[in-house]
Every structure is written in structure tokens, then in C-alpha cells.
Image (tube, helix red, strand yellow):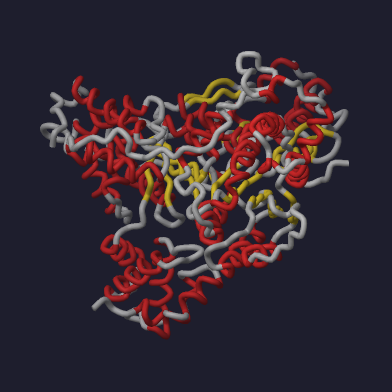
Amino acid sequence: MSLAPAAGPAAGPDLTVELTGLADALRRAGVDVPVGGARAAVVALAALAATEDGEPSRGATYWAARLTLCARPDDLTVFDEVFALWFDRAEWAGDVRRGVTLPTYRDVPVPGDQADAGDVEVASAPPTASRLEVLRQRDVAALDAGDRALVAHLLERMAHRPAYRRSRRTRPGHHGRVDLRRVVREAVRTGGDPVHWPRRQRRPRPRRTVVLLDVSGSMRRYAETYLLFAHALVRSQPDAEVFSLGTRLTCLTRAFRSSDPQRSTDEVARRVVDWSGGTRLGEGLAVFLDRWGRRGTARGAVVVVVSDGWERGDATLLGEQMEQLHRLAHRVVWANPNRARPGFAPRTAGLVAALPHVDAFVDGHSVAALEALTDEIAGGRRA
Amino acid sequence: MQGPESVAALVDDLARVGYLADEGTATAAWLAWRTSRPLLLEGEPGVGKTSLATALAQVLGRDLVRLQCYEGIDASAALYDWDHPRQLLHVRALEAAGGVDADALEHDLWSRRFLLPRPLLRSLEAPSVLLVDELDRADDEFEAFLLELLSDFAVTIPEYGTVTAEVPPLVVVTSNRTREVHDALKRRCYYHWVEHPDLERETEIVRRSVPEADAALAAGVARVVARLRDEDLLKAPGVAESIDWARTLAALGATTVEPAAAARTLGAVLKYREDQQRVAAHLAELLAEPA
């Protein structure tokens, strides 16, 4: 046990240093250590140490640190590794997790941004209304760098509206139940006789939107577009959740919390380890339903699956899982970037298995198609 | 402060009221009590998150105040409400008795006698264990509201005043992870992920909960349920299901998990038709004693 001894129950400086160092090491390993976590760890360990003789045991140190420095189950495996390395002083690897690089918009100058305008010719020409209209309709997979930057801006500004449902919360209104609280208040003035009956009515609440993003190789050319789409969605709907589906399932919602789309995509790249790999939609969906969906994330939500339906795994499993999903969700929308191609027919085994359990099957190749998708999510087509 | 002096003492106390805690769970609970910091429990449904709160209330000799969260839960359901019908009657009664002083009436109306405490307020009024169950079901606004209460164990009721807890409640928050609980809340809590109990502990839990079950039956149920958790199921059975199953089998007179009885009672462990079908197909294999 290499933990420096702390004299007595008071947290000695060494203990504080050790636990702060551990917290830093965890952060470097990708754990979102809560703010103030290290201080809480010191307090916890001091409380535990006060009941033990001598220096704090390894068990007490482990639990004091784990209970305060971790905040989600995914952190725990990393925590165990880091804790062992930290306290055994084994070769400390700076990068426990390898970062994955994603093609980005970073190097593309933004139209109208003087600081960056220059080497890309397109960027210096102000976009005209007709050019934007053409761009809206174009397949995003076939765009050049300048056009992609413009499309990125369109996507970031896309109007995401949630679908609504009625909730149990109420607000003052003309219908609904009588607001007794206000009746009592007014009765004081009128001597007990309610003169009028104010009411409260139920307030509509937004439905959650859940996006399941296929990040396999065949979807590569659309990945950036959908990440920007998802970023704008999470920014405008605080309830929304985004997951990537490839050979495994990854929850991306937290990665999109940053207001900067570039930082968000970088964070996504760090989290998604199966980028451009194969597709096992059925298995991924099963994990989603098991760990999130059935417990409530998908319940009553509008679930959008973005995929071309190239399933390497068992299409029967995909069909079963889609059926489950359909039973849980309010609506299931499937967006397919290939759908708009001439001669397209949903013939892949994955699509054939999935489509019977889908409420809407829509295009997903252009800005216009994604705008239509936002309408589909909101539940009503734009007039 | 009276109560368990150490984690080991808490483990013993919990065992005495029938809750067999592992080291992590006991440490988390002990720290939450000793340092007045809420405990956030996550884990598969049925690992004993809720029953930990019940057991802690028994150990500490405090009331258990339970707040079940749901979508749309608000302050009047969670914190307090006014007894409006009684208030109205009061106004009319005074009116009938003759002239009333409006100010005195106002003061009267918003006093403790017309205040209906809901769980959160109750947990502040007497030493208690406050269980905020399935917080992930409530919406963001409610979480923010709860945060305020958890940071200083006090609430302000506009018409009435501030209620502060003399003894801070031991707060146990559970979440099934249908969504991520906010960082701000996590920052104030100890975070503990509760695992399914190991074979030995689960056997012991079943034996204590179902005294009428044979020792061999309890061990068998724990073993088979542990195997079921490794299967690819829609809903893996929790401890509650183990207990139910043992009770059902014991009621049928079984002394071991035998194939015929197991097949008839599968519904006590598996709650999805798909799961039952999948397991029924190779039940004999699952029930086989380890070589």
C-alpha cells in the first residue's frame, strides 16, 4: 500500500494530494469527475479513517474515491484500472483511451467570416438565395468543402421542434380543474363567497426525441451531416438523446452539450470507438432497448433511426427489436440517405425486416430532406 | 450521534433487519449518514436499491418517507399543499359568526393547521430516511427544485415561512437510468452502482425472506437465477424475483428446483413472454447441477 499515511482522522496534506492526483488521472482517462469530487473524497476518507486504526485501508480509500469521483456505471471499469495503476505506481499511461480522429469542418473557412476567408474561392462569394436553394436539395455526400461549410451552417440553424403531449402539470387557463388556491385567496376579500372560479388546465409537454445514428462504414459520407443535425437537436431540445449504432452502442448526448459544434464532434470522435466499422443494427438496438429504451428513454418518445439498413448481423433479430421499439415509442421514423437515389427499393434484408415496424420512412440525403425530417419529428408536416 | 459507529457495525445492523449489504453498499450508506450527504443509487431493477432505504430507516429508528417520482410531479405533490376546502369552510364559518378582521383571517388561513405536508416536507419535520424513488422519471424542473432542498435541508413556503430540518434526513435517491441525472445533483451525492448480489449472499437473502423454503431450494433458486442473468433476456430477474420464485416453489411443496415445478412457475421469475419461451426451450440445461 503506497498511500502516504495520514496522521489521524484529519485529512493530512498527503492524503489530499493523493486523492486530487487520482481525480486528475481519472479525468485524463476520460471520466467526467464531478466538480468538487476530490474534496468530497477527502472528507469521506477522513470519516472512514476515523473509525479505523492506523492509516486508511485500501478498501476505505477505494470506496471513498469511487463514491465521490465516479458518477455513472461506465466510469467504474476505468476507475478500477486507474485506481490500481495509481496506487500501485505501475507505469502510468497518459492515454488510457485512444482518441479516434474524425473528418471535420475545422479547416473549412466559414462564408462571411473575414478572418478565415481566403484560400477557398467559394467562400468569398456571398451565397445567393438561389444557390442556397440548390444546396438544400443536393445530396450532402457529393458536396465540395465550401458547400459543406454552408450546409453545416444551415444544419446548425435548423428549426428543431419537439412533438407534444399533455402533462399532469397545469397552468392558469379557461378549461380544466378549478384553481382552489386562487378561490381561497379571493374568498378572503369577498367574505367566503367565491365570485368567480379560476381554472387551471393541463400544460402540453414536449415529447422526447431519440436519435439512433448508424455510424458504420456505409454511412461514412453522411456521418458529419448527422452529427451536426444531432448537435442542433440536443441544443434545442434538452430532453433529446442521441446514440451511435455500429458494432456497439454509445450514448452521445453528453458529447453534444457543448455549444460549439466542432467541440461536440471532437468529443463524439473520442467516444465512438467503432467509427466506420461494420453494422450490427439488431444487436445495437437490443442493447439500446435493454439498457435505456425499455426503462423509459424510448417510452412515449419519437425515435428516429438514421441508417441505410445494411445489416451484417441477423436481420431477424433486427426485426424483433424494431417490433419492440415500435411498441415502446410514440412514433418510429426511419431516415435513409439512399432512399432518394434513382431506382432505390428497400430490398436489403435489414430494411425488409425493419420497415413493417416503422411509422414513417423518409429521405435523409439533403438539407431539405432533413428539414422534412424535423417536421416528421414534430408530428405535423409543414403547411 | 447515536447509530452505527463504523461500516462494519452498519453491516451487522442491516443484517439484523434482514438486509445483507456488500462492502460498497454499506460504505456508501454509512458515509451518507455520517456526513449528511445524499446517496444516489443506480443499478439494475431489483438489486435492492429501494429496500436499502427501508432497512436504513429500521436501523436508525427513523421514519421512512417515500417519494415516488413520475413525469409531471410538482411541488404540490412532493412538498406541501394547502387544504383548500377546509380553508373555504373556515372563511364561511367565520363570516357566518359575524364580522371578521381580514388581516387576522389571512394570517389564520395560511397557518400550519391548513398545511398538508407531502413527503419532502414531512422528511424535514421529523428525523427520517427520505427515499426519492426513480428520480429519472421526474422532469428537469423537479430535479432543480429538489437540488435546492438537498443543499440546505430547508424549504420556504411563501405564505408560511421557512421550514428547516433539525435533523437532516438521510436521503437515498434511486435512478433506473432512463436518462442521465443532472451533474449538479450528482455533484452533491455519493454515487453508488449496486450490483446483483453474489451467489452466496443471494442464497442467504432468499433463506431469510422465505423461511419456509428448504436450504437446497434457496441455493438452487439463487444458482438458476444467477444463470438466467447471463442469458440474453429482455428483463433479467432481480432479487425480488428470486424471492417470489422460492416462495412459489415452496408453496408447491418443492424442496429443490425440479424441472416440472420450475416450468410451471417460470412466470414468477420471467416477466416477458419472449423470455419465458427462450428459457423454456433449454430449461433442463439451466437447472442442471454444476458438475
Q: Residue furthest left?
A: A54
Q: Nearer the viewer, residue A55 or A251?
A: A251
Q: Residue at x 61, y 35 (%)?
A: A231
**Which of the 4 quarters of the picture holds residue B145?**
top right
**Which of the 4 quarters of the picture holds residue A184?**
top right
Would you say residue A345 is visible in this rendering? yes
Q: Residue at x 68, y 23 (%)?
A: A121
Query: Is A193 positioned to the left or the right of A81 in the image?
Result: right
Q: Residue at x 39, y 29 (%)?
A: B167
Where's residue A267, x and y in %?
49, 34
Q: Residue at x 65, y 23 (%)?
A: A110
Q: Quadrant of the C terminus of chain B?
A: bottom left
Query: Is A239 positioned to the left or the right of B101 in the image?
Result: left
Residue B263 to residue A225: above or below: below
Residue B231 to residue A50: above or below: below
Q: Nearer the viewer, residue A93 or B222?
A: A93
Where's residue B97, x and y in %?
78, 26
Where's residue B245, x and y in %?
42, 71
